[in-house]
Amino acid sequence: MENLQSAIDFIGGPAALWILASVYFGSVILERLWAIRGNPDYNNKDALCSIGLNLMSSVINLVIGLLIPLALYVLVFDNLRLFESIPLLLAIPLAFVLHEFPYYWDHRLAHRIGLLWAFHAIHHSSNDFNHSTAARGFFLDGQLKAFFAIPAAFIGIDPVIYIAVSVCTNAFGIWNHASWVPRLGWVDRVLMTPKMHKIHHANQPQYIDRNYSQVTLLFDRLFGSTAYLGEEPNPGLVKPTYDYNPLTAQFVGLMQLKHRTDAAERWQDKLAYLWRPPEWSHDGVCRSDCPKYSGAAHA
């Protein structure tokens, strides 16, 4: 038990960010080395763009995505928690469920609300699927998770335990973007393995808005959003983008949202694009995000 507590204290302490950074960059480097023989079509420009997007969003997120949520979590934990102390062997699985559940709903809302999708679309904008895309993001994406974590603080999950579990689940979330992992049989029906998560990144109609969870398929099964591998998933947006400049690529979702709102004349319709699902349009015309999109003919 002491060893477990020491591991939690280390992972959930000051080393947390260094651990995640090491997992991410280590995975990217090792996968690139493997690609020399195993994947000669590895897109270096796309990978460098993803890394650039990760670095830009991470710097900004140190404040709005980490320090402020952490301060809020500690404030609730110190002053409002229901239980003074929760045994470690109970706190860890509780922290996992209370992390996975908010992750699922934050992720699902990011796909189903127009403005949130504009923030999240950059993560799906790569036409490749590998470790580099794991942290490809926009700094405003995923911020709802900070508020969804408050129940864990309210129950009494120690911040160090919650952070340690978050580090481990996010490390798993980096791994499940691996391009080198094959199908894993029954494991693919229990965990969000790379093949199952590749489905989530695919732009085929049968795969869109499926497999939202980070580690397990528990909540996807519970809320009916699971898809299993059939046709080989084709990663990327329904309307693909090929911008490898991280300074401009980060705005792909916002630009596609602007394209849709510009088509509307009434302000009510323009506002509706902010909260309606991304495939919705005021006039029934498919402009970029609906599954039937096939290019300029619908633009």
Image: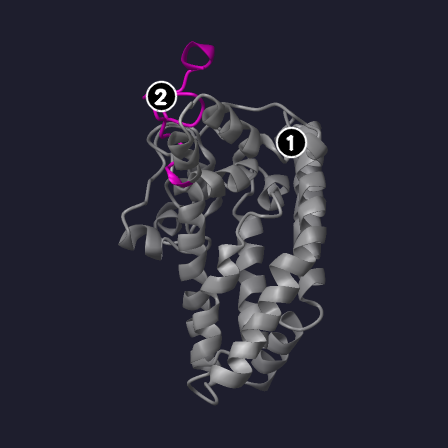
Q: Main secondary structure of the magenta part?
A: loop
Give the crowd class for mark 1: few <14, some 14-19, many >=20 residues within 10 Å. Answer: many
Q: Does the rendering let one see residue 154?
A: yes
Q: Magenta segment, which residues?
A: 275-299
Q: Does the rendering let one see residue 158?
A: no
Of 27 and 150, which appears nearest the observer? 150
Q: Which residue occupies the extreme top position in the image?
A: 297
Indicate the quadrant containing the N terminus: top left, top right, bottom left or bottom right: bottom right
Q: Which residue sits at x=44%, y=38%? A: 274
Residue 178 is one of the magenta-drawn residues: no
Q: Is residue 214 above or below residue 2?
A: above
Residue 279 is one of the magenta-drawn residues: yes
Residue 283 lies, in percent from the top left, at 33, 21
- Amino acid type at image mark 2: Lys
Q: Which mark is residue 297?
A: none
Q: Which residue sits at x=72%, y=52%? A: 59
Q: CA distance from mark 2 to mark 1?
A: 24 Å
- Amino acid type at image mark 1: Ala
Q: Which residue is mark 1?
A: 249
Q: Which mark is residue 292?
A: 2
Q: Are marks 2 and 1 in contact (CB under 8 Å)?
A: no
Indicate the quadrant containing the C terminus: top left, top right, bottom left or bottom right: top left
Q: Is residue 257 above or below residue 95?
A: above
**Along the horizontal axis of the image, is 3 left or right of 239?**
right
Q: Quadrant of residue 126?
A: top right
Of 56 and 261, which appears nearest the observer? 261
Q: Is residue 92 above or below residue 166?
A: below
Residue 69 lies, in percent from the top left, at 58, 65
